[in-house]
Amino acid sequence: MSEYQFLAFRAIDRPLTDRELVFAEKQSTRADISRWSFTNEYHFGDFRGDADGLLRHGYSAHLHYANFGVRKIALRLPAGLPFPKAVWSQFVGTTRLRWKKDSKGQGGILTVEPFHDAGEIEEIWSPEDYMEDVVEIRNRLVAGDLRALYLLWLCAALDDEFDPVDRTEPPVPGGLAEFKISGASLLEFFGVDPLIMIAASEGASPTPDVQSHEQQISGWTDRLSEGDSKRQLRRFLVEDAAAVKAELIATIRESKAPSDWPTVALGRSLQDLLDRTDALRAEYDAKESAKQAARAKREAANRQRERQERMKEMVKEPERWLREAERLVEARGTDNYEAAAEILTDLRGAVGSGKGDRITRKHAAHLVKKHPTLNRLKASLRKRSLLD
């Protein structure tokens, strides 16, 4: 298997400044770089740039995939994790899901990087398709959705170096069964069956009655005085707009009553979740198999009805169908030979075993004599006893 790597960075809150763009261009001479994105693919060699540096210089989300086991995403959160430390520390802290705070300010980088042995996880053919999921999960985190942090814990927890029996899940956020992210699932990117979210939601509380991100902002801005509104507008126009936005979002979040996202501690091990997921997968696959079998039965019945209708037409005009079989043979191709043989078979049944057999076998012999080199045609005819 040849080596393949894909790296992507995405700016979300704002485009890169001139200085940040210069920094990005110094990290790679081969990458496709813009003020909004940075992407590169490797079939040999490696990325030697500063991934964390790129996240601290304008980009907000990062994805790294390699077919020899690397699955990594990193999220830049300029206002920090939007939960009290007593909450987020129950999810974050292992080497596979880690929070690296900036030396100054509240911001930092949240990284998900489980270890997988090469060949132990299914290969991904279009890793770029998952970048929208990375952006969406960051947006959920910034809005204070604890379910996003739980999902990232699941992505990080299934690590080849740790026994799932020894890992206990953190508190389960309410509304987990309803949690969706756009596009392809990040769980799939990390080799996790998405049904684990259904398994994890069993026993959890329903979706909490919390304000949306837009509702929080609307309520806060409505309470601003005219003077404060002008002051904040001046800051956006003069200072770093992204930094100001991050600071204000943190302020809005902290201004809420500390009700937090409701959770329940179920004390399940990761192995418990995996066992339940396997059971759900077996149920799901059984239902899908039943659906496919029912669909196949309906399609077979439809084909049989169509065949019966065609055979009625064949009785009226057998010569027309002999010509159609010849036309298909003239068009060449294995599928056409099969279709021609099928027409002759149905015509034999429609006309009747005696006369029908004589007509069709005579025409089959005619086709073979006319096209003596078409061995696949001969095989199709012999398979239906139309040719000796």
Image (cartoon, rainbow, N blue to C red):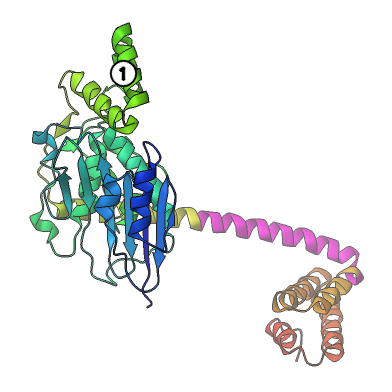
Q: Nearer the viewer, residue 294 or 282?
A: 282
Residue at 19%, 60% (x, y): give it: 159
x then y, percent, for residue 172: 18, 38
Question: In the displayed structure, would residue 336 be above or below residue 36?
Answer: below
Question: In the displayed structure, would residue 368 be above or below residue 211?
Answer: below
Residue at 41%, 56% (x, y): give it: 39
Secondary structure type for disc 1: helix
**Is 312 a magenta residue?**
yes
Q: Main secondary structure of the magenta part?
A: helix
Q: Nearer the viewer, residue 31 or 160?
A: 31
- What segment is highlighted magenta in the picture? 293-319
Q: Nearer the viewer, residue 322 or 309?
A: 322
Residue at 59%, 54% (x, y): give it: 298
Q: Quadrant of the N terminus?
A: bottom left
Find disc 1 in the rendering and name its residue: 232
Residue at 37%, 40% (x, y): give it: 12
